[in-house]
Image: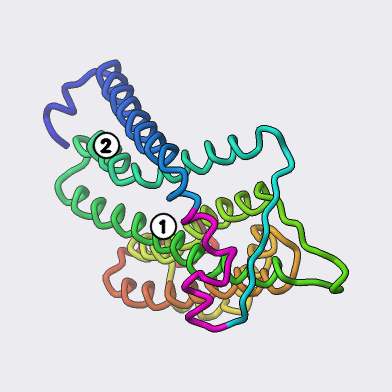
Amino acid sequence: MSEAAENKSFWEHLEDLRGSLIRMLIAAFVFSTLAFCFKDLLFRIVLAPKDSSFFMYKLFGGGDFSIQLMNTGLTEQFMIHLKTACAFGILMASPYIIYVLFDFVRPALYEKERRHSVSLVLAAYGMFLIGVAVNYLFVFPLTVRFLGTYQVSGEVRNMLTLQSYMDTLLMMSLVFGIVFEIPVISWLLARFGLLKAEWMTQYRRHAIVAILILAAIITPTGDAFTLLIVSLPIWLLYELSVIVVRRTGKDARPCVSNPLTL
């Protein structure tokens, strides 16, 4: 901990926090405004998975299709534009936001803690971005392709709303970003001896049931196909976490001998 941080009063720390929050809000506002102004590019990216020209469909094959979206509210398109721009703005400003947060906390950390904190933050941020990318590139397009073109009869036409499309995309992106933190959290717990690979292997079946329940909760639709698509990456992350914990466990600092005693 630096001497300057120790000498600061509570109100001085509060003033530093206020300044950090203002800088983060300004950065988010600036990038959100830029995203709002580039409407055509923004929605060209967002709406790409609804057509067969999206690269993922070309990669895995499939027939031509195009899902038509409709608007049902007077202010709906404007509000969706605003919400989507804010989401993209926060995502683009996130490196600076994380830097400001770390800069605020850094004086209170010792040198060794700073090094570990940087690694942890970078890993967590990187995994979050990977989760968002996996959803946009693979999971969401597969969901849209299947559910958007599924028909019980040729006489029944699918009429999907823009609101439904955007809510599903944004919600699934956030969920997958959070879910992809599982290996990072597992690594952190293993570092403190709170998690062992043997426990994860022993309770693998229980974990699979828990994964299915979690996927059922976070799945925007109630169909089995989407449930499977959401469950598969989570299960793969669990298996990756087992490997991470096994490698980390050798250098872990034991805190407890049994997870049930926490």
Q: Quadrant of the N terminus?
A: top left
Residue 100's tag is 2
Which element is circle 1 on?
Answer: helix
Q: Which residues are magenta?
A: 44-61
53 inside magenta stretch: yes
Residue 207 image position (x, y, % from top left)? 59, 72
Look at the image and tell me whether residue 255 can be seen. no
Q: Residue furthest top?
A: 11
The prevailing secondary structure element of the residues shown in magenta is helix
Image quadrant where residue 147 sits? bottom right
| Mark 1 residue crowding within 10 angstroms, few (<14) / some (14–19) / many (20+) | many
Question: With respect to residue 3, does 39 lie above or below?
Answer: below
Residue 128's tag is 1
Question: With respect to residue 123, does 55 lie above or below?
Answer: below
Choose the circle earlier in sequence order: 2 or 1.
Answer: 2
Q: Residue at x 70, y 45 (%)?
A: 71
Residue 253 as seen in the image, left or right of residue 107: right
Q: Residue at x 47, y 41 (%)?
A: 85
